[in-house]
Image (cartoon, rainbow, N blue to C red):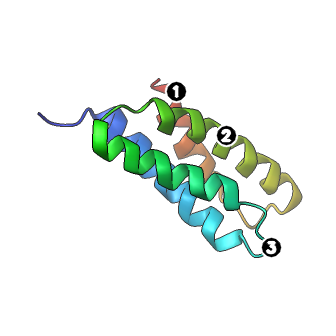
Amino acid sequence: MDEPKENIALLKSTNEALEKFEKINTKGDFDEIIDKLKYVHGSYNHDGNPVGVVEFGKKALELLKDYKQQKPRQVGKKLIDNLEKSLAEF
């Protein structure tokens, strides 16, 4: 069985968010969301249920928007747009 395209888009966008958090996490401020995103990605790979990815994708989106307000050049608009678009499918 193939994965639904919305799940693939969600995994891709949350993985991009995870990579961004890892890049900007110089003071350990984003350790928790990094750990949660890694966990829910692993959980999804195990059971195919995107509920956790959606939940923490939304939290990641909020954190990225807040961070972008403080440091606009650190977070790209495309990253936020892709995350919003993939979360809108759920």
Judged left or right of residue 34, residue 75 is: right
Q: Position of residue 21 (x, y in %)?
A: 64, 63
Task: Compare marks 1 and 3 and give the one earlier in the sequence.
Answer: 3
Task: Compare marks 2 and 1 and give the one earlier in the sequence.
Answer: 2
Residue 19 occupies quadrant: bottom right
Residue 75 occupies quadrant: bottom right
Q: Position of residue 42 (x, y in %)?
A: 39, 50
Q: Which of the two marks, 2 or 1, is nearer to us in this view? A: 2
Are the residues flagged by discs 2 and 3 in contact, CB closer than 8 Å?
no
Q: Which of the two marks, 1 or 3, is nearer to us in this view? A: 3
Amino acid type, callout 2: Lys
Task: Compare marks 2 and 3 and give the one earlier in the sequence.
Answer: 3
Amino acid type, callout 1: Ala
Amino acid type, callout 3: Lys
Residue under pointer 1? 88
- Secondary element under disc 2, as helix, strand or loop, is helix
Label 2: how many Cα within 10 Å (few below 14, some 14–19, many 20+): some
Residue under pointer 2? 59
- Secondary element under disc 1, as helix, strand or loop, is helix
Residue nearest the viewer, comparing 43 with 59: 43
Q: CA distance from mark 2 to mark 1?
A: 14 Å
Residue nearest the viewer, comparing 46 with 75: 46
Does 29 appear above or below 45? below
Q: Residue at x 55, y 59 (%)?
A: 18
Name of the residue lying farthest toward the left: 1
Judged left or right of residue 29, residue 81 is: left
Quarter of the image for the N terminus: give it: top left
Label 1: how many Cα within 10 Å (few below 14, some 14–19, many 20+): few
Residue under pointer 3? 27
Q: Residue at x 75, y 76 (%)?
A: 26
Q: Position of residue 63 (x, y in %)?
A: 74, 48
Q: CA distance from mark 2 to mark 3?
A: 19 Å
